Amino acid sequence: MPSLETRLTSVIRDVPDFPKPGIVFKDITPVLARPDLLQAVTDYYVERYAGKVDAVVGMESRGFIFGTPIALALGAAFVPARKPGKLPYSRISEEYALEYGTARLDMHTDAILPGQRVLIVDDLIATGGTAVATAKLVERLGGTIVAMAFVIELTFLPGRAAVAPHIVDSIVRY
Ligand code: AMP
């Protein structure tokens, strides 16, 4: 059987100029249409982090999709890092820079307990801004980041350096 990277690369779809000119969007919806591939991504990270994490943090929205089955299989809590205006309870926020303007992620104040070991999960790391903001939320609540896991890493962008010294784990690299 081909490697997981090859199996994923064969279905991940490049959509040029989305959401704006010059961006090549990596569309992972064909991965979601293949239960064998979603299962294989889940298994890949469950094998690597079994017994090592208490909580999985996923960033809205695609981090929810990949993070939830990983958390469930690890027997870990799933924690959503959400876009503004979504979380109902007491929360903390981190703003981060986008190419134009800023974005913000929120987390409930009781989502991570001090000392908990955390795996951060998203579909893709590009500049690392989203991951850095998420890491700050986790650390403000006293969590310890074990690693950051992505399906896709864009190695022509400085995401890995931006999140250092945190560990970046990825399956497909472009
Ligand atoms: P960044 O904060 O620059 O690392 O961007 C990561 C976030 O933006 C992730 O939640 C990705 O889903 C999304 N993202 C950034 N660039 C792309 C891309 N080329 N294709 C798909 N999603 C992207």
Image: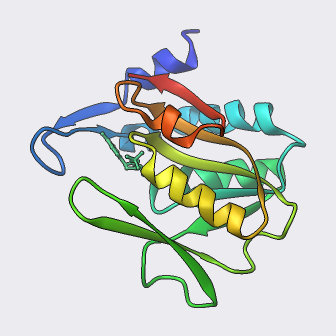
In the depicted structure, whether residue 65 falls above or below residue 95: above
Q: In front here: 145 or 75?
A: 145
Q: Nearer the viewer, residue 29 or 92?
A: 92
The extreme left residue here reads: 21
Where is the C terminus found, in terms of image quarters?
top left
Q: Position of residue 6 (x, y in %)?
A: 47, 15
On screen, residue 93 versus residue 142, left or right, reads: left
For the point 29% across and 32% down, which residue is it? 13
Q: Is residue 112 left or right of residue 97?
A: right
Q: Quadrant of residue 23?
A: top left
Residue 5's x, y, as percent? 51, 19
Q: Quadrant of residue 24?
A: top left
- The answer to which of 7 and 93 lies nearer the viewer is 93
Residue at image coords 52%, 50% = 131
Instruction: List the single residue furthest toward the top.
Output: 1
Quarter of the image with the N terminus is top right
Looking at the image, is 6 positioned above or below residue 145?
Answer: above
* Residue at horizontal 21 percent and vertical 59 percent from the top: 100
Residue 60 point in image, percent of width and height: 47, 63
Residue 143 located left or right of residue 7 = right
Q: Position of residue 139 (x, y in %)?
A: 70, 61
- In the image, what residue occupies the spot 37% across and 44% down? 29
How many marks can you see? 0
How are the colours assigned in the image?
rainbow
Q: Is residue 44 above or below residue 63?
A: above
